[in-house]
Amino acid sequence: MNRTTTTPDPTARRRAVVIALCWALVLLDGIDTFVYGSVLPEMIGSGQLGLTDATAGEIGSATTFGMLVGTVLSGTVTRWVGRRPAVFASVALFTAATLGSGLAGSAVVFGFCRLLCGFGLGALLPIAIAYGMEFWPGNRRALATGVITTAHQAGGALAPLIALVLVDTAGWRWVFVAGAVPAVVLLPVAVRLLPESPAILAARGRSQEAAAVSAEHGLASAAPVPAAPAPERPDRWAGLRALFRGGRWPVTLLFWLTSFAGLMLVYGVGQWLPKIMGDLGYETGDALLFSTALNVGGIVGMVVAGRLADLVGARRIVVAWFALTAVFVHLLGVHLPVAVLYVVVFFAGLLLFSGQSMVYAAVGAHHDAGDRDTALGWVAGMGRFGAVFGPWLGGALLAAGRADLGFTAFAVTGLFGAAMMALASLTIRFRGPRSSRQRSEAGG
């Protein structure tokens, strides 16, 4: 009896290593992003740094402002130095700053550490998404985006659990330390195993290296080799200008506005959910576990949205998801039985986090590999204005004693995001996508 045996594909294993490393690094990003919201009730209650609702909101906004700068610079810097160095620098920065947050002796030092942390946190995610889109097998870029961003929500789900274990026994400072330690182990592994992007190598004129990395990872068509050598002094801002040339500026701006709404939801709801729920009368344990339920919903949503987006188009999913997010976020402010509220929180997380990740999928599908890093960096960076505004708005409403209005404001934001992506889709349909590939991938 003859048995057919299949030989494992070494290139598939190497691609899997790249995806796994990006996922693990984004997991650390998620923990260090959401750890602040998880310990915020204890930090304010302990009075150790003199934080109030208003100053806590300002520090949250400082963190997201740092993310804004880091995200905007990530795409451009990646074109200058490559993805590998940008990834390593961003992880090292947010890890050191998270550790510094746990050691801070004053609100000023703590806020400065969170600002620095934001630089690194903001830079990593768009680069990791671009890696995923390039190294994912087949042509499922939306699914690649969804899978990579599940790590961010997994980190968001772990952060309140870490806080629940450590806050009462060791204090809030050790929660930050626990969030920083894993990177000390993971970063050297990434330095050893993570390859440079073939697309970036080709764009920088290193065509032979690009071809070698592509062959090693089974990406023969992923990094086209230029027919002529690249100029010695390439135009480093060409990627940004390409987002506005040829009548592309309306779509670029609409993508940016959609991302503004999405990240206002992600960081506004993500940071303030435990505190608002506590102010609305729920137990501290439930308030923290609501954050876990929110992020577990986000993990499920990333995979579901990614699969659906590859079938019907990422832009369509964004419009539907943001509209539904408005409904479920509004329900968070309604006094419901705790068991029912957990279900509402789960679906709110499923929709709002994956809705934002599909914004990245839509942008990534709309752009070619050569300018994808820049497009993703800038759409995430402009969205960070919403990430700055969301925590500030939550803090201002809490300081004014109007916690009940917080979820209503975020629900309106969801409707705004749906409208902006719908306008982007109409504009692309009117002007026509740049290629048949984009028509099939982005839901044109």
Image (cartoon, helix red, strand yellow):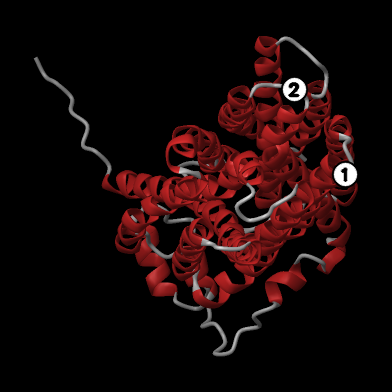
- Between circles 2 and 1, the one closer to the viewer is 2
62 shown above or below 29: below
Residue at the spot 31% in from the left edge and 61% down from the top edge: 188
402 shown above or below 197: above
Image x and y of residue 355, in percent = 71, 36
Amino acid marked by disc 2: Gly
Residue at the spot 79% in from the left edge and 47% down from the top edge: 390
Residue that protrudes farthest toward the left in the picture: 1
**Which mark is drawn over residue 420?**
1
Q: Quadrant of residue 304?
A: top right
Count of numbered labels shown in the rendering: 2
- Quarter placement of the C terminus: top right
Residue at the spot 46% in from the left edge and 37% down from the top edge: 162
Label 1 crowding class (10 Å Cα cut-off): few <14, some 14-19, many 20+? many
Image x and y of residue 102, in percent = 50, 56
Mark 2 or mark 1, earlier in chain:
2
Residue labelled with disc 2 = 281
Residue that protrudes farthest toward the bottom in the picture: 232
Local secondary structure at mark 1: helix
368 shown above or below 171: below
Image x and y of residue 133, in percent = 54, 49
Query: Is residue 382 in sight in this rendering?
Result: yes
Query: Is residue 224 in sight in this rendering?
Result: no
Local secondary structure at mark 2: loop
Q: Nearer the viewer, residue 263 or 166?
A: 166
Whole-Å distance between the Cαs marked 2 and 1? 35 Å
The answer to whether marks 2 and 1 mark residues whose Cβ atoms lie closer than 8 Å is: no
- Quarter placement of the N terminus: top left
Amino acid marked by disc 1: Met
**Left or right for 244, reference 140:** right
